[in-house]
């Protein structure tokens, strides 16, 4: 690796982000511009932006490392990540756009006519968002530490300052352009090295299939409970990510939101294929990197390992640029969604309060990231999916589709899902995952926390004597009747 080239690549991403954000800033003027880009983002742009923010540090760096470590087991993550958007497409994309809301708490308050439910939702959204931002900052620290031997705080602070400044300056409209650009940069930064690595390794080299996929890590080794629980978390977790859901509010219509989701499924699938291929190449060319704490760096180390000299250094620099784009895009999406919540729930909901909120929503996870040590990036992001699937997803899904759901049911479901999932995740640090069914239940709690949260929502709603909100039927009709009708 060449530290100078790698730092030049980082500088390129930083400058490009500032320039693209400045372009969006020129046309960000109204409150609606800052919160939902005035609901004028067309499908291709919106799909690129959603894909840009969805493909995080855990995907760009961690997925290849997971395939390197776990073989076929690692493929469950990209399958779940991509398939989660199918559920979004089928159940919530168009209704959320038709809701007329700016944020998820907006939707909850309008659906249940309850300020209390809104406040609980805001707290859950902030927890999910901050938990998701921290791995992005850890990824930036890890990247600059590997390629340039810089202290961990440099990468985290660099990303936080850029993200906070960009979101505060231009809001959703500016960030849309930034994220769309960063998706295509990330895709290029993986596909180009993959092509060169395959060509470099394919020159008459005899590859042992049992080395790539040992029988011990094949389908027969999957634990049924853990696999099902993981898939539930990934599938339903996407529906509970605030930075994903808020982007559907930027579509012009419900039909446009659905078409956007179809494009997203295609875009992220292509990216996951490239990232997984990088992990497969590593199993052949660099099996020695299959170590805890090292596997997350395989994407950064592999090009120069396989292709020595300037060509390998240039490919590494391209990967570094893509990695930084991943940290910036996901963090930007999270901060812009959280800033909208804090601005409306804590301040006045103005452009000025949005900007103050953006700075605050960046500072909190930065402090946490500086005080903690990075763990496996994929596992860190996976915990967020479990938490979102257990707390927010049941409320969003049932709020759209079940007429009899009440505010008390929503609050009780979010509270029980969040508390039980949080308790299981904390207990997981003290209990060995291999210690029988208890270890498996706390290591992958989604299989029981999600049904429990749904059951609580249903029971409390059915026994709620206050009954349905007065305008529930009218609001549900708005969610489900196409605009042209």
Image: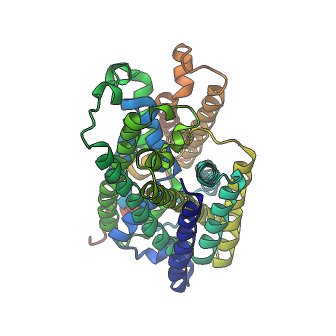
The residue closer to the viewer here, 207 or 430, is: 207
Q: Is residue 60 above or below residue 53?
A: above
Q: Up-down: is 279 above or below 7?
A: above
- Front one among 109 and 435: 435
- How is the model colour-coded? rainbow
Q: Is residue 245 visible?
A: no
Does 326 sit above or below residue 303? below
Q: Name the residue at the front extreme.
A: 309
Residue sitting at the far top? 436
- Residue 414: name its quadrant: top right
| Residue 455 locus on image (x, y percent) | 48, 33
Residue at image position (60%, 70%) is 167
Instruction: Give the left or right position of residue 476, taking residue 375 as reference.
Output: left
Task: Give the residue displayed 53% in from the left and 68% down from the top.
Answer: 13
Please state, as top left, top right, bottom left or bottom right, where the C terminus lies in the image.
Answer: bottom left
Relative to 156, is 299 on the left or the right? left
Q: Residue at x 44, y 61 (%)?
A: 52
Q: Is residue 233 visible?
A: yes
Which residue is at a point 54% across and 63% down the rendered structure image? 5
Residue situated in front as seen by the camera: 63 or 463: 63
Question: Residue 97, how many percent across, how many down?
Answer: 41, 65
Q: How many marks?
A: 0
Q: Position of residue 191 (x, y in %)?
A: 35, 55
| Apparent side of residue 225 relative to residue 390 in the rendered image (left or right) | left
């Amino acid at each position: 690796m060449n530290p100078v080239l790698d730092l030049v690549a980082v500088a390129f991403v930083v400058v490009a982000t500032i320039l693209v954000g400045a372009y969006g800033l020129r046309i960000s003027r109204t409150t609606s511009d800052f919160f939902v880009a005035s609901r004028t983002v067309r499908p291709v742009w919106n799909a690129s932006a959603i894909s840009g923010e969805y493909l995080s540090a855990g995907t760009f760096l961690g997925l290849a490392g997971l395939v390197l470590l776990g073989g076929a087991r690692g493929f469950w993550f990209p399958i779940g990540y991509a398939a989660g958007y199918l559920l979004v497409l089928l159940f919530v994309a168009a209704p959320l756009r038709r809701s007329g809301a700016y944020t998820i708490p907006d939707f909850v308050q309008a659906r249940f006519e309850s300020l209390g439910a809104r406040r609980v939702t805001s707290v859950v959204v902030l927890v999910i968002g901050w938990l998701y931002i921290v791995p992005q900052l850890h990824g930036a620290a890890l990247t600059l530490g590997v390629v340039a031997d810089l202290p961990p705080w440099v990468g985290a602070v660099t990303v936080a300052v850029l993200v906070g400044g960009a979101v505060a300056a231009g809001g959703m409209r500016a960030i849309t352009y930034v994220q769309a650009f960063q998706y295509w940069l990330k895709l290029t930064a993986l596909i180009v090295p993959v092509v060169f690595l395959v060509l470099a390794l394919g020159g008459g080299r005899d590859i042992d299939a049992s080395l790539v996929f040992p029988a011990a890590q094949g389908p027969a080794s999957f634990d049924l409970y853990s696999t099902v629980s993981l898939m539930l978390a990934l599938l339903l977790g996407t529906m509970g990510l605030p930075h994903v859901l808020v982007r559907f509010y930027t579509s012009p219509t419900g039909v446009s939101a659905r078409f956007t989701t179809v494009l997203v499924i295609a875009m992220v699938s292509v990216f996951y294929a490239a990232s997984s291929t990088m992990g497969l190449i590593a199993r052949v060319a660099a099996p020695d990197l299959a170590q805890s704490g090292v596997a997350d760096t395989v994407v950064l180390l592999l090009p120069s390992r396989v292709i020595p000299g300037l060509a390998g250094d240039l490919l590494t620099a391209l990967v570094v640029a893509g990695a930084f784009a991943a940290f910036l895009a996901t963090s930007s999406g999270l901060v812009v969604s959280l800033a909208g919540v804090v601005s409306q729930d804590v301040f006045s909901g103005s452009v000025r309060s949005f900007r103050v909120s953006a700075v605050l929503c960046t500072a909190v996870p930065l402090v946490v990231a500086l005080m903690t040590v990075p763990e496996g990036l994929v596992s860190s992001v996976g915990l967020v999916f479990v938490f979102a699937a257990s707390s927010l997803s049941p409320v969003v899904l049932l709020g759209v589709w079940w007429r009899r759901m009440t505010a008390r049911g929503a609050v009780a479901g979010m509270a029980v899902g969040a508390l039980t999932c949080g308790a299981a995740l904390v207990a997981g640090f003290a209990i060995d995952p291999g210690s029988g069914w208890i270890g498996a239940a706390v290591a992958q709690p989604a299989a029981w926390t999600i049904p429990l949260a749904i059951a609580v929502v249903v029971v409390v709603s059915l026994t709620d004597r206050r009954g349905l909100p007065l305008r529930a039927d009218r609001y549900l009709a708005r969610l489900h009747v196409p605009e042209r009708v």
